[in-house]
Amino acid sequence: MARIPDDLFYTEEHEYLKATDEEGVYQVGVTDYAQGELGDIVFLELPAAGDSFSHMETFGTIEAVKAVSDLYAPVSGEVVAVNDALEDDPSLVNSDPYGAGWMVRMRVSDPSELDALMSPDAYRELVGED
C-alpha cells in the first residue's frame, strides 16, 4: 500500500507538492504510488534552477527499468532549486519519495492554481487506496 501523506497536494499525473519553510515555494516530486508503479528509477532529467514552467508543461523525465515518463509542472512557476543528489543516486526517489527523493523546488507564480490540485483523499480515491 502506497504512503499518501495528508499534508501534500497531488496531481492526476502522480506528482506532489509539499510546502517548504519559504512562502510560495513548494517541493515537487513523484508520489510513493508512482515510484512503485515505475519500479527501480535509474535516471532523471531535471531542469536547472531559474527555469520557468507553465502549469502541466513537461519539466523533465524519469527513467525506470520498466519505462520512461514525462514529469509535469503541477503549477506555474520558477525552479529555485534542483535536488542534485538524484544525479548520483536516482534510487532516492524509490526509497524516500517525499524526503530525500524530491526533485525540484518551485516558486509558484499563480497561487490560485493550488486550488485545482487534488487533496490526499481525492488522490487516494484515484489510486484505489481509499
Image: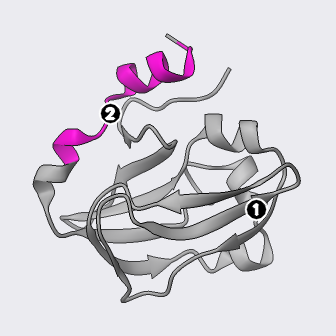
Residue 122 located within the stretch drawn in magenta:
yes
- Amino acid on which the number 2 mark rests in the picture: Met
Is disc 2 surrounded by few (<14), some (14 to 19) or many (20+) residues within 10 Å?
Answer: some
The disc placed on residue 40 is none
Q: Find the magenta span and give its range.
A: 114-129
The residue tagged 2 is: 118
Measured as percent of width and height from the top left, residue 40 is found at: 84, 51
- Amino acid on which the number 1 mark rests in the picture: Glu
The residue tagged 1 is: 63
Q: Is the Cβ of the residue at disc 2 closer than 8 Å to that at disc 1?
A: no
Above or below, 110 against 49 in this view is above
Magenta segment main secondary structure? helix
Measured as percent of width and height from the top left, residue 69 is found at: 66, 56
Q: Residue at x 72, y 78 (%)?
A: 87
Quadrant of the frame with the N terminus: top right
Measured as percent of width and height from the top left, residue 60 is found at: 56, 71
Residue 12 located within the stretch drawn in magenta:
no
Colour scheme shown? one colour
Real-space Cα separation, disc 2 to disc 1, in angstroms:
25 Å
Is 12 or 41 nearer to us in this picture? 12
Q: Secondary structure at mark 1?
A: strand
Measured as percent of width and height from the top left, residue 106 is found at: 34, 70
Q: Number of callouts in the render?
A: 2
Query: Is residue 101 visible in the rendered structure shown here?
Result: no
Q: Residue at x 39, y 29 (%)?
A: 6
Left-right relation of 123 to 119: right
